[in-house]
């Protein structure tokens, strides 16, 4: 409930958000993937020399291959600038669904809900010894619970958007088969 005042508070808030985001990704069976491309040239004159697509979890294990491939191209083309570009995206069970913005919105909404839920629980736990604390009339708690309900509505709206898109895709596929 309190605003962060020190760098450690800010870091712990970020850590809580990252944990909530990871939990939301696991619940939704969404995976983070990275598309890595090794390119030469600049601006509109660039060409892709090699590309990889792999889960972010494998990125650290495969970094030596990417670095080796980049070094090889630098040796082959010493006068041309060689860049490595990383493009991150979410995939549902490893399949690119093309709903990047919708998945981002849903994961962020679930992470925000988890963070707010933890804050409410922490506030109630901190107030347990306070004999003047009344959960039914506490302004801070009521405001936090209203924010929690709004976060739940955001999750439901994001779910509905994705269900609608999914149903549209299924309906279009059925009409293509017939």
Image: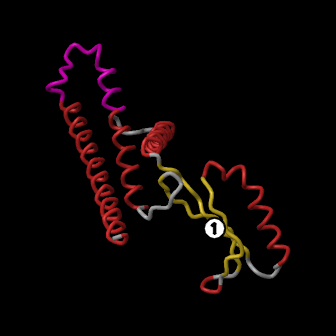
Percent position of residue 61, x then y: 72, 49
Residue with the most extreme front position? 178
Q: Is 85 situated above or below 152?
A: below
Q: Which residue is under mark 1?
A: 85
For mark 1, give the secondary structure. strand
Q: How many marks?
A: 1
On screen, 67 above or below 9? below
- State which quarter of the image contains the C terminus: bottom left
Q: Nearer the viewer, residue 23 or 96?
A: 96
Question: Can you tell which quarter of the image residue 112 is in?
Answer: top left
Q: Quadrant of residue 81?
A: bottom right
- Residue drawn where x is 27% and y is 49% of the image: 154
In depth, the one of 28 and 120 nearer the eye is 28
Please name the colour scheme applied to the rendered image: secondary structure
Please name whichever residue, 165 or 147, is drawn nearer the observer in this view of the structure.
165
- Is 122 magenta? The answer is yes
* Mark 1 surroundings: few (<14), some (14-19) or many (≥20) residues within 10 A: some
Residue 64 located left or right of residue 85: right
Q: Is residue 80 left or right of residue 103?
A: right
Pinpoint residue 80: horizontal percent, then vertical percent: 76, 81
Residue at 74% across, 61% down:
66
Quadrant for the N terminus in the image: top left
> Residue 67 appears in which quarter of the rendering?
bottom right
Q: Is residue 36 magenta?
A: no
Furthest toward the right, the residue is: 75
Pinpoint residue 95: horizontal percent, then vertical percent: 51, 58
Q: Residue furthest bottom?
A: 45
Q: Is residue 7 above or below residue 106?
A: above
Q: Which residue is at a point 22% across and 13% down the rendered structure image?
A: 131
The residue stretch that appears in magenta: 118-138
């Amino acid at each position: 409930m309190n605003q962060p005042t020190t760098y450690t508070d800010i870091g712990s808030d970020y850590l809580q958000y990252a944990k909530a985001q990871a939990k939301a990704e696991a619940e939704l069976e969404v995976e983070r993937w990275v598309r890595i491309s090794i390119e030469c040239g600049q601006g509109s004159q660039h060409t892709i020399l090699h590309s990889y697509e792999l889960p972010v979890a494998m990125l650290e294990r495969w970094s030596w291959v990417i670095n080796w491939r980049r070094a090889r191209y630098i040796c082959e083309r010493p006068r041309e600038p060689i860049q490595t570009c990383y493009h991150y995206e979410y995939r549902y069970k490893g399949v690119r669904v093309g709903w990047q913005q919708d998945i981002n919105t849903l994961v962020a909404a679930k992470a925000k809900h988890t963070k707010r839920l933890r804050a409410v629980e922490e506030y109630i736990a901190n107030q347990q010894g306070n004999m003047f604390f009344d959960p039914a009339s506490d302004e801070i708690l009521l405001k936090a619970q209203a924010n929690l309900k709004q976060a739940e509505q955001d999750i439901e709206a994001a779910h509905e958007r994705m269900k609608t898109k999914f149903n549209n895709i299924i309906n279009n596929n059925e009409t293509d088969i017939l």
